[in-house]
Image (tube, helix red, strand yellow):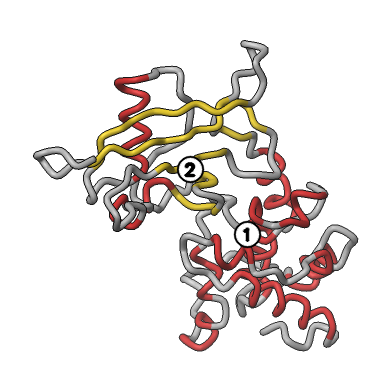
């Protein structure tokens, strides 16, 4: 129902969990006013500020850069700060219901907050930093535009876990490195300044590496930064299949 100021009433159906109350996971609903220009994060802040202060979720920059407010929204992994209400409101004027759940594949700590440590552990294992030998340079390492373009897409990752927690292989077995770790490995494997490509490829050639990917494209569809995640994983596979000849030096 629309109010005189143009706001509409939205029903938020939120999956709640508090490890201290003994109730287990359950659903709670809240009726929240919203303008078409609001983001879903604004509605969650309204619930926490005016309806239920115990609602727990992560958020920081609110501009799609920090990646902290990743959630399962109407069955799709998205950032709450990037979901505009005008895209969620039905055309027939009915009161919309938006379901919100924590992202899958990671232990839920409380409400919409998950334990990100398994995700970051996989990220750290692929050594996401420039690996070089010799003395420190006296000036910046120069790189051609073509060399930079080779891995530019995968530099956009904000470590929100939307891609990894949308992967059915990761849901089934959390030991899989997951799309985000492979994307960040790709960023350095194909960097012409880096000397650790072979080491990273050996890591990703293991039982929990790139060969676990089943090319469902869930990760690509979930990425809020538009990274071609499945393509990046395929390029890492090719680098392994063709005896690392695809690796730029």
Check disc 2: other Cα within 10 Å, few if <14, some if 14-19, many if 20+. many
Left or right: 27 as drawn, with respect to 190? left
Precedes in sequence: disc 1 or disc 2: 2
Left or right of 209, for residue 231: left
Q: Where residue 60 sits in the image (x, y, percent)?
A: 39, 39
What residue is pinned by disc 2? 68
Marking on residue 235: none
Residue furthest to the top = 21
Q: Label 1 vs label 2: CA separation?
A: 22 Å
Which of 248/102 is in front?
A: 102
Q: Quadrant of the N terminus?
A: top left
How far from the left and from the top, in percent, is residue 10?
A: 33, 39
Which of the 4 quarters of the picture holds residue 19? top right
Instruction: State whether residue 22 is above or below residue 236.
Output: above
Location of residue 16 in the rendering, given as x and y in whole percent from the top left corner: 55, 26
Point out the residue furthest to the right here.
207
Q: Nearer the viewer, residue 139 or 124?
A: 124
Give the residue pinned by disc 1. 129
Q: Secondary structure at mark 1?
A: loop
Q: Is residue 3 left or right of residue 85?
A: left
Seen from the viewer's position, the closer of residues 241 and 36 is 36
Q: From what the image shows, is residue 117 above or below residue 211? A: above
In the rendered image, residue 26, in percent from the top left (x then y), is placed at 60, 26
What residue occupies the far left of the structure in this picture? 4
Q: Residue at x 65, y 69 (%)?
A: 217
Local packing at callout 1 (Cα closer than 10 Å; few below 14, some 14-19, many 20+) is few
Quadrant containing the C terminus is: bottom right
Which residue is at a point 49% across and 41% down the rendered structure image? 99
Q: Nearer the viewer, residue 98 or 17?
A: 98
SS at circle 2: loop
- The residue shown at (69%, 40%) is 106
Q: Residue at x 40, y 53 (%)?
A: 65
């Amino acid at each position: 129902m629309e109010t005189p100021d143009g706001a509409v009433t939205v029903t938020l159906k939120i999956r709640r969990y508090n490890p201290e109350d003994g109730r287990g996971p359950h659903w709670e609903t809240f009726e929240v006013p919203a303008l078409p220009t609001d983001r879903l994060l604004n509605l969650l802040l309204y619930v926490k500020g005016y309806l239920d202060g115990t609602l727990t979720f992560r958020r920081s920059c609110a501009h799609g850069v920090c990646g902290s407010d990743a959630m399962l929204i109407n069955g799709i992994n998205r950032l709450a700060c990037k979901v505009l209400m005008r895209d969620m409101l039905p055309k027939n004027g009915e009161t919309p219901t938006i379901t919100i759940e924590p992202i899958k594949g990671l232990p839920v700590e409380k409400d919409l907050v998950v334990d990100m440590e398994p995700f970051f552990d996989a990220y750290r294992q692929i050594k996401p930093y420039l690996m070089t030998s010799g003395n420190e340079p006296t000036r910046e390492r120069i790189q051609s535009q073509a060399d930079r373009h080779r891995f530019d897409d995968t530099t956009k990752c904000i470590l929100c876990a939307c891609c990894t927690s949308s992967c059915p292989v990761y849901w089934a077995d959390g030991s899989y490195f997951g799309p985000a770790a492979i994307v960040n490995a790709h960023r350095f494997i194909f960097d012409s300044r880096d000397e650790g490509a072979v080491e990273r490829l050996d890591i990703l050639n293991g039982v929990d590496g790139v060969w676990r990917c089943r090319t469902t494209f869930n990760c690509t569809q979930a990425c809020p930064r538009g990274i071609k995640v499945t393509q990046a994983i395929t390029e890492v596979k090719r680098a392994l299949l063709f005896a690392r000849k695809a690796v730029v030096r």
